[in-house]
Amino acid sequence: MSGEGKEDVVKKIPEWELKFWSYVHAGDGEHCPVYTSCTAREAGGLCPDDGKELLQLLLSDMQFKPKEYSPIRRLDYPGLIYQWVERLAEEYLETLKADCPPVPTELAFLSDEQSDVEIREIPLKLCAGALWRWKGRWVIYLKSDDSRARQRLTIFHEVFHILAHSRATAAPAFKKREQNRGAFNELVADSFGLFVLTPRQCVNIIWAKYNDLDKMAQIFAVPESAMWLRLKLLGLI
């Protein structure tokens, strides 16, 4: 991309989002870059940086039993970073005029204005998904053995990586740690996927109608554990 073209793309990015990417870029990829200065974390609830393994387990579709998590009375995503992640997801859906639910995975093809995006299923062993840059296009690889609901989360997890790289103004804004289940940057990408597939307003409206976890997971086409997490984050259960 020419310097002039890159400048045009940057101008389209709002100031809050540029700050968000700069925070993520400033971190080490392992921990939240504002952890030590986050006043919201001190207010209580589960700080995502302190509960990365638990949260990522809930974002998978492994065997899930809600009663096992009943002792968790409060589950928050405090702090500015996660407010920005949800805002990014909301504006991504608004920009692409997505109807929900379920949010169509075809939105992934529109995540980079400058490059094509392709999705392939392969027999991955060590991870649920991967992202490659190949011949000027993005290729999202999905674990072929995963359920479709789990693959949907993986797709938008990888979309976050695409956004992080395509909207960076200097060096890539996302430091990825290979095979590191609990890394902060991976949880941010997981959270973006969850927020895209379960928009706050839609969840609130449909939960008021059905009040049923299994039904909600079916409607939004996400793993039951991920739906439980979203309902918990919104204070609905």
Image: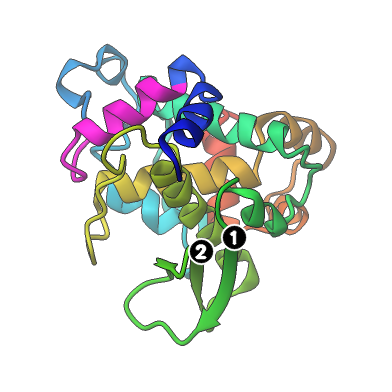
Q: Is residue 81 magenta?
A: no
Of residues 74 and 186, the one drawn nearer to the viewer in this rendering: 186
Q: Quadrant of the C terminus?
A: top right
What residue sits 19% from the left and 39% below the top? 31
Query: Which image quadrant for residue 82?
Result: top left
Residue sitting at the far right = 209
Measured as percent of width and height from the top left, residue 86 is found at: 52, 31
| Amino acid type of the residue tagged 2 in the rendering | Arg
| Amino acid type of the residue tagged 1 in the rendering | Asp
Q: Are marks 2 and 1 in contact (CB under 8 Å)?
A: yes
Q: Which mark is residue 116?
A: 1
Q: Image check: 73 left or right of 111?
A: left
Mark 2 surroundings: few (<14), some (14-19) or many (≥20) residues within 10 A: some
Q: Which residue is mark 2?
A: 137
Q: Quadrant of the N terminus?
A: top left
Query: Which image quadrant for residue 128?
Result: bottom left
Of residues 16 and 60, the one drawn nearer to the viewer in this rendering: 16
Q: Earlier in the sequence, mark 2 or mark 1?
A: 1
Q: Which residues are magenta?
A: 17-32
Q: Does the magenta stretch mainly form a helix, a strand or a loop?
A: helix
The reply to whether residue 65 is visible in this rendering is yes
